[in-house]
């Protein structure tokens, strides 16, 4: 699944996220967040040609349980999962290379 440019209309439940097979990147942020907007090109570059990686873009904010369940405090926060388990996270990434390395970690053979 390639880069996703828009936020999901309804975030998945934590139980559903915990059951996701394979490699997943969950991106927490908001459309109006300037840090999130600046990170979009970096995220897109890191996920380019990575069809095996699921990208889930979640709009976070007050009352949003999924972000709280992951302890998200700043945006964007990228959570890198393998088979529903967190492998790593990046908060306000500044370089595509850091995202690329985290993607490599969740796609490497276990």
Image: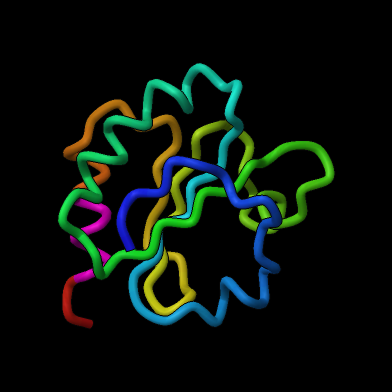
Of residue 52 and residue 65, the one placed in the foreground of this image is: 52
Looking at the image, is 41 positioned above or below residue 86? Answer: above
Question: Residue 109, percent across and down?
Answer: 17, 80
Between 16 and 106, the residue placed more toward the observer is: 16
- Indicate left or right for 2 with 101 as reference: right
Q: Could you tell whether 79 is left or right of 3 in the image? A: right
In the image, residue 106 lies in the stretch drawn in magenta: yes
Relative to 13, does residue 58 appear above or below in the rendering?
above
Q: Position of residue 28 (x, y in %)?
A: 55, 43
Q: Which residue is rendered at x = 67% and y = 77% of the image?
A: 15
- Image quarter hosting the N terminus: bottom left
The answer to which image quadrant residue 39 occupies is top left
Residue at image coords 62%, 55%: 70
Looking at this view, name the residue that lies furthest to the top.
Answer: 34
Judged by its main secondary structure, the magenta piece is: helix
Position of residue 87 measured from the top left corner of the image (x, y, whole percent): 38, 64
Q: Which residues are magenta?
A: 101-107
Q: Residue at coordinates 41% horizontally, 57% vertically from top-left?
A: 55
Residue lying at 21% horizontally and 39% vertically, measured from the top left: 45
Residue 62, percent across and down?
81, 38
Q: How is the image coloured?
A: rainbow
Q: Can you tell which quarter of the image residue 21 is in?
A: bottom left
Count the marks: 0
Q: Is residue 86 above or below residue 62?
A: below
What is the quadrant of the C terminus in the image? bottom left
Residue 105: say if magenta. Answer: yes
18 horizontally vs 41: left or right: right
């Amino acid at each position: 699944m390639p880069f996703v440019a828009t936020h999901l209309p309804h975030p998945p439940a934590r139980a559903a996220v915990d059951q996701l097979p394979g490699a997943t990147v969950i991106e927490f942020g908001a459309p109006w967040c300037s840090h999130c907007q600046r990170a979009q090109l970096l995220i897109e570059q890191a996920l380019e040609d990575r069809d095996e990686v699921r990208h889930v873009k979640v709009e976070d904010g007050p009352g949003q349980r999924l972000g709280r369940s992951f302890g998200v405090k700043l945006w964007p926060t990228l959570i890198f999962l393998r088979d529903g388990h967190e492998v790593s996270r990046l908060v306000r990434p500044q370089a595509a290379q850091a995202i690329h390395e985290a993607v490599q970690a969740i796609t490497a053979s276990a």
